[in-house]
Image: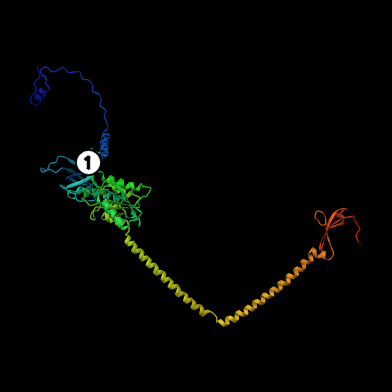
Amino acid sequence: MPKRPPTGFHARRAQQQRIDWDNPPPQASEQPAPTPQSRPVGEVARHIRAQLKADPQLNDVWIEGEVRSFNRSGAGHYYFDLADSQEDGKSDAALSCAFFRRDNRGMAVQQGDQVLVHGSADVYLPRGSLQIIVDDLRPIGEGVLQAEFERLFRNLGEEGLFNPERKRPLPTYPRRIGVVTSPSGAVWHDIQQVLTRRWPLTSLLLSPCLTQGAGAAESIAEAIQRLNLLTVDEPNVIIVARGGGSPEDLWAYNEEPVARAIFASEIPVISAVGHETDVSIADHVADRRAPTPSAAAEIAVPDRAEEAARVAGLRQAADQQINNRILELAQRGLLNRERLERSAPHPPTMRVELNRRSRELDQAIERQLTLLRAAQSAASSRLNALNPRATLQRGYAIVSDADGQVVASAAALNPDRDVTIQFADGRVAATTKNRDDQHDR
């Protein structure tokens, strides 16, 4: 019995596949399919999660949408869906969001709010669901730039980049100033004029950079780093400057690379971005903020007119102190002279006393001289008595041999020996004839 042809959907499907239901094709012998290579669910889920974490666009993303299915847990965490808002109440897509208590700080969020959230994509492994981990939430009216400013300001502040105790004093008389700005703008010209007028002893060094647009933040950071790498004629202070503009034009000075380059600078930095009402993150990190680039130049160097007036004032004060000191010493000298005159004895009495003491001193000296003369005379008599010449004058003589040695005994001389006889009035050469060894008894 032939099979009943299919109807409806199956008929159309059969027609597309051109199946002859009366004469079906022969069935091929079934072969066992190879076992596919499988992976654990956790491994696949973690791989997806790692791919999300490796995507920088999904780890630092701002998303705009409407709050749906809002739920606040007992622990203070917020869970909701962020969906595209449509007029019919439907949405093209939705993302699950988790806003933990440490980040939401109890802020007011409710169903239907149009918000701007910042966060990163993640996978909740127990359910395998994609969710956005929110770390900041702002109403749509506050704007993306303001929300990003506050987020970065909070994060950098927690790292200590704005701490007042790390800010360094500026040098009083800088020898060289580095300027980070565009070489073609009016800022560079204005700073040169101010420095020439106020303190021409300081030289300027331009480190050119982009001040707005794509890559401006990196360009500014590199210009700051170049000045810090100098080893010859390095600047004593750096001015990071830009003229006024819209928030979008000045946004590069609110980016993280610029903030970290200023924080890492070993040279003190003055930030001068925009006008007085424009406050950037660079202003908070810098050692000093100036309302305008021209004001930064005025802050960096002293005014020569003011310095001249100050030096003149110091000179006048020094002269006054010297005069006062001279007058004080003169008055003290007069006072001491008066005290000395009052304490000194009467002059006539002093003269009598001096004469008396002078006579006593003369007499004492004379007595000492008499004693010294007597001692000298006695010593002279003793020396004369011991002088060999005095003995010779009494008729004695000194005999010495040919070598000049004194002959003290007749036994020391043999006949025919040359000798010298020393008398009181001279010497006589003689020759011995014979020797008489008998002595007078």
x then y, percent, for residue 74: 23, 48
Relative side of 234 to 247, left or right:
right
- In the image, what residue occupies the spot 28% across and 34% down? 43
Considering every residue shown, the one lying at the far left of the view is 8
Relative side of 88 to 47, left or right:
left
Mark 1: few/some/many CA within 10 Å (<14, 14-19, 20+): many
Q: Is residue 26 above or below residue 308?
A: above
x then y, percent, for residue 311: 36, 63
x then y, percent, for residue 293: 27, 54
| Quadrant for the C terminus in the image | bottom right
Q: Secondary structure at mark 1?
A: strand
Is residue 332 or residue 27 the one in the foreground?
332
Is residue 67 or residue 236 the one in the foreground?
236
Where is mark 1, residue-wise? 131
- In the image, what residue occupies the spot 11% across and 23% down? 16
Q: Is residue 154 visible?
A: yes
Q: Is residue 74 visible?
A: no
Relative side of 362 to 90, left or right:
right
Q: How many marks?
A: 1
What's the image's color scheme?
Answer: rainbow
Q: Is residue 80 above or below residue 48?
A: below
Task: Residue type at mark 1: give it.
Answer: Gln
Relative side of 362 to 2, left or right:
right
x then y, percent, for residue 94: 17, 41
| Quadrant for the N terminus in the image | top left
